[in-house]
Image: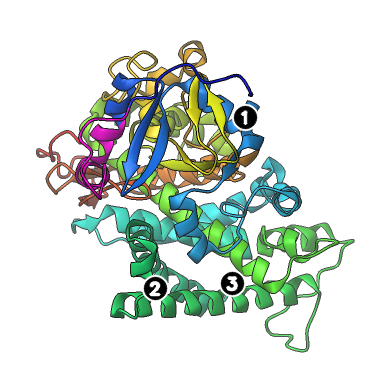
Amino acid sequence: MSAPATSPTRTAPGGLPLIGHGLQLARNPLPFISSLREHGSVVRIRIGPTPAYVVTDPDLTRKVLVTDAAHYAKGGKIIDALRVFFGDGLATIADGDAHLRNRRLMQPMFNKAHIADRGDAMVEQVAATVSAWPEGQPREVYEDMNEVTLGAFLVALFGADLPEHLAGEFTALMPDIMKGTIRQTILPPWATRLPLPANRAHAQRVARLRALIDQAIDHRASRVSGPSSDAGTTVAFDAGCPHAAAAREQRTGLFDTLLTAENPLTRQQLQDEAITLLTGAIETTGTTLAWTLCEITRHPHVEQRLRKELATACADRPLTYGDLEHLPYARRVLQETIRKYGPAWLVTRTATRDLDLGGHLVPGGADVVWSPYLHQHDPDVFSDPDAFDPDRWTAENAAATRGSFLAFGDGRRKCIGENFAWAELQIILATVLRTWPSFRLTSPAPRPQAVVTVKPDHMTMEFHRDPAANRGPSGGRPG
């Protein structure tokens, strides 16, 4: 780490006075970030007047995230902006003892056994939402996927008996919360502090979200602590009765792990973690599912293989959580979508001191940028990277991509919810396919829009129960 840097660090072309490369990041972010590979393994850009160092080599990215992670702290402009909303949740809290403690405390929430205990409740929730869509009416798919994802995650997080009014208000509030949060990450810090109507509205929504989370926490706490005086809303479970134990598993939520911890979190910390979990689950999972349905409409052979796999796994009965292990092709389809569309495209760290990164000098305090999108579109690793090819992820092919698929990060800050994300993605995709034998894109081909995630700019679809319905032309191939 102390060896002197020897390689000159090139500055990306196209920077402008005062705003640096901000215009390119705003107008053509994905082509711009991908183009940096041509200028070296570490490339300097300017975000406004501030320099940042973009790592384009996957081996050096591994140094940042894994082998030398202690010297690249969680931080940077994007993380700092998100921290205003998330507080000190697991995704934004600074490195150190608090992060390690909270991660160890939360890790059991996301092991496969905990997820499996809540799997069938999630399946039921998703099926109820997806089957209620009106047939034959164009629907905003991105919004639908976020709503389905939120509903499933609320069941998993707070239990299947969350009061309906809470679940409904969460669902109504989160889209505007997400838009406001994205806006906050784009604007300079001084602009987010001005008493503008948009800033005030966002602050009010965040305050309401925290109040709702407080109510959900109190609801779960009353269940965890046992029967209350309100016999109509609390059920006493007999630990010796297997039927009662099974019923309790259906009602419990992942959040119970935090509520029953030996050294529990403060109320503020519980709020921060709930917001982090909800936002991460909605934005990334909803984006992935919307793009997956879009790609299916453009690749009939993919849809046919998916439906055949589902028919083999489930026959004529409803989907269950146990069926997911028999859907390997669905997993490959989802992984290819994640590779192609991110969903996160730009992540930052902060150099803790002057560092030598692959022979390049990175000054202490500088932002270090890495991009899952850039690595996952590297033509040296992924042939024809703009093509949609789920068979990249067969066992024999996937080994060659190790180190370049970074959608969930790597190292000690790797996404804690990866196992849950895969389960939720498979449940929702399988449920949409089982519920709707036919669907098609009705809008023009959506364009990838890079904000916090790589989301579609506009995407509508029609869903039909007749397999032969609406087999007319659909929108063009997505970009």
Residue drawn where x is 43% and y is 80% of the image: 204
User: Looking at numbered disc 1 in the image, what kind of residue is underneath it?
Assistant: Val
Please state which of residues 324 and 39 is positioned toward the viewer in this rendering: 39
Residue projecting furthest to the bottom:
229
Q: Counting residues from the N terminus, which is met first, the one under dot 2 or under dot 3?
A: 3
Q: How crowded is mark 1: few (under 14 residues within 10 Å), some or many (20 or more)?
A: some
Residue projecting furthest to the right:
240
Please state which of residues 462 and 389 is positioned toward the viewer in this rendering: 389
Can you say whether 65 is above or below 349 in the image?
above
User: Which quadrant of the structure image shows residue 145?
Assistant: bottom left
Q: Where does label 3 land, which residue?
A: 162
User: Looking at numbered disc 2 in the image, what kind of residue is underneath it?
Assistant: Arg
Residue stretch in magenta: 11-33
Can you tell which of label 1 and label 2 is closer to the viewer? 2
Q: Position of residue 224 (x, y in %)?
A: 77, 70
Q: Which mark is residue 193?
A: 2
Q: Where is residue 23 in the image (x, y as percent from the top left)?
A: 21, 46
Can you say whether 211 is above or below 93 in the image?
below
Can you say whether 409 is above or below 120 in the image?
above
Q: Distance between the residues labelled 3 and 1?
A: 39 Å
Question: Does the magenta portion include 20?
Answer: yes
Left-right relation of 353 to 291: right
Q: Where does label 1 land, which residue?
A: 66
User: Looking at numbered disc 3 in the image, what kind of residue is underneath it?
Assistant: Leu
Q: How far apart are marks 2 and 3 (CA)?
A: 35 Å
